[in-house]
Amino acid sequence: MPELPEVESVRRGLEEAKICAPVEKVFRSRKKLRMDSPLRSLVGATPGKLRRRGKYIIWEFSRADGGDPSSAIGLLLHLGMSGRCGIAQAPAPRVLHTHMILTFADRRELRFVDPRRFGGFRVSPLAELLSAPPISKLGPEPIDPGFSGAVLAGRLGRSARSIRDALLDQHAVAGVGNIYALEALFEARIHPLTSAAKLRASAWERLAKSLGDVLRRGIDNGGTTLKDFRNVVGEVGRNQDDLRVYGRGGDPCPDCGRPLKSFVSGGRSGVYCPYDQSARRVR
Ligand SMILES: [Zn+2]
């Protein structure tokens, strides 16, 4: 599932494509998506600034009548489990599971492809999009300069849940999923099943730092591709080669050589080093 670094890679790719021709037409498949809305208001609108919040991309469009910035339209994109956003040339054949297309006046197209259909999009006035859920409910961005152990503890410090499960809550901290949570907990030497409420200030600081480190590394590597993820030009990411523990249960720990241990919590698998992330050794 795409997490913050994968979504940021897509955002950067869309930005680098420098699309500035207005939307000429829109296409929508008949398949149901988890998030969905009419696209018609984008016809004639010109694409502008691209932002990201957590695992969402927000693309700003201005209306054909221009002028009034309060009339800006927002296109909210979410990749869900298996979604891809690609830029294609208009005559190129559509791949299977293409659910949405914006055709720009320069013949380029934004194509949203999602085999599992857990992703989707929403079009609405930009101001409304930014001030309503899901965006308004997201926790802080873990790669923002102001992010710290104190911020993280403020969001999660009273949670009785395991710290791994708590980190996946998008209302507490935005953009983190299972891969980067497990990698950050390993780097911070925190047992993933420790109750969040039991972590000390020093552990929160280590965790805030390691979260920022693993996410920034993921962005620098163009994201992690385990199966579906591709950037806007169809390339896989490179971060899977830099993962230290994710998906490696039973393999030797990259630091101490003892076997990494797998677990399941909250319906999701995980992995840790019982020696380096011992619950007794560090909190
Ligand atoms: Zn180890």
Image (cartoon, grey):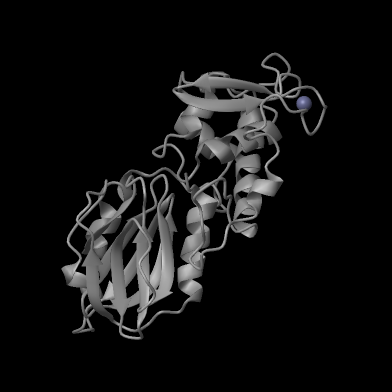
Q: Is residue 223 above or below residue 278?
A: below
User: Please, which residue is most extreme toward the right here?
Assistant: 256
Report x, y in % for residue 92: 39, 75
User: Please, which residue is most extreme toward the top here?
Assistant: 280
- Residue 107 appears left or right of 18: left
Report x, y in % for residue 278: 70, 18
Q: Is residue 211 above or below residue 71?
A: above
Q: Is residue 196 visible?
A: yes
Q: Is residue 157 visible?
A: no
Residue visible at 40% across and 79% down in the picture: 19
Q: Is residue 274 above or below residue 134?
A: above
Residue 280: image quadrant is top right
Which quadrant of the render holds ligand 1?
top right
Residue visible at 38% across and 47% down in the picture: 80
Residue visible at 62% across and 22% down in the picture: 262
- Residue 252 appears left or right of 129: right
Residue visible at 37% across and 58% down in the picture: 113
Residue 171: image quadrant is top left
Observer-nearest of 189 and 31: 31
Observer-nearest of 152 and 7: 7
Total number of numbered discs in the rendering: 0
Report x, y in % for residue 45: 25, 78
Report x, y in % for residue 199: 59, 23
Looking at the figure, which quarter contains the C terminus?
A: top right
